[in-house]
Amino acid sequence: MGAKHSTCDIEKYVLRFDDIEKRESSYRPIDMMLERFERKRYAVLGRPAEQKGEITPLDNVKAFNITYLKVEPGKGLATHGHQTPEAFIVMRGTWRVTLGIDSEQEIILKPFDIISVPPNEMHGAQVVGEETGWLMTINAGHGGAKLFWPPNLVEELRNNGADVSDVEIPGASTN
């Protein structure tokens, strides 16, 4: 028996970059409460809970999800971790990507460079060039992974009045 052939509306499966603003995510990770981690997040594939409008075939990808991040110079993503691997692909700008809870390792990435961050590895990223940076992130699964944060970031957020009672900290007691 051969494969069933059908003609679908191909345009339903396309996101044009000119329409990226329609995909701006409502989700704000806790680090975005600090000015140096402000950014725009766009849920490109998967992550249906982050969509503002009608669910489309772009939201129904189950195996992985893709987010675009738009970040101004000097800003970035706080050190964090999660139980799934994550790939970063630089689309525009110059980025410093760090590994380790205290950023023990770092590397500079430029457009179309890619790094694959292993599961449970603490990592962060910052735009170090003079132009606005764009970063593509690819994660396993339909939605985003639960994030965990280093204790120093959680303490800084708490000192700035943030409610961090539901934040995971690596190695912290769960009692």
Image (cartoon, helix red, strand yellow):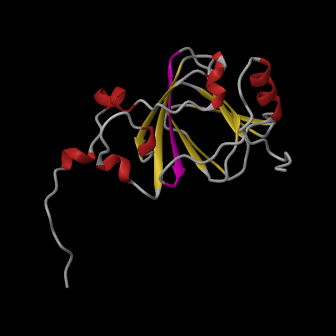
Q: Position of residue 174 (x, y in %)?
A: 82, 50
* Residue located farthest toward the bottom when viewing the structure as drawn: 1
Q: Residue at x 64, y 16 (%)?
A: 35
Q: Position of residue 67 (x, y in %)?
A: 47, 39
Q: How many marks?
A: 0
Q: Is residue 105 left or right of residue 90?
A: right
**Magenta stretch, overall SS:** strand
**Residue 129, percent from left and from top:** 58, 18
Q: Which residues are magenta?
A: 131-141
Assign the N terminus to one quadrant of the image.
bottom left
Q: Nearer the viewer, residue 163 or 114?
A: 163
The residue lying toward the viewer, choosing from 16 and 51, is 51
Q: Residue at x 36, y 53 (%)?
A: 60
Q: Is residue 71 visible?
A: yes
Residue drawn at x 64%, y 30% as measured from the top left = 30
Residue 45: name its quadrant: top left
Q: Residue at x 67, y 48 (%)?
A: 82
> Do we see residue 127 in this rendering?
no
Above or below: residue 73 compared with residue 141: above
Name the one closer to the observer, 140 or 99. Answer: 140
The residue most toward the left is 7
Judge whether residue 79 is colored magenta.
no
94 shown above or below 141: above
Q: Residue 153, percent across and down? A: 77, 28
Q: Quadrant of residue 44?
A: top left
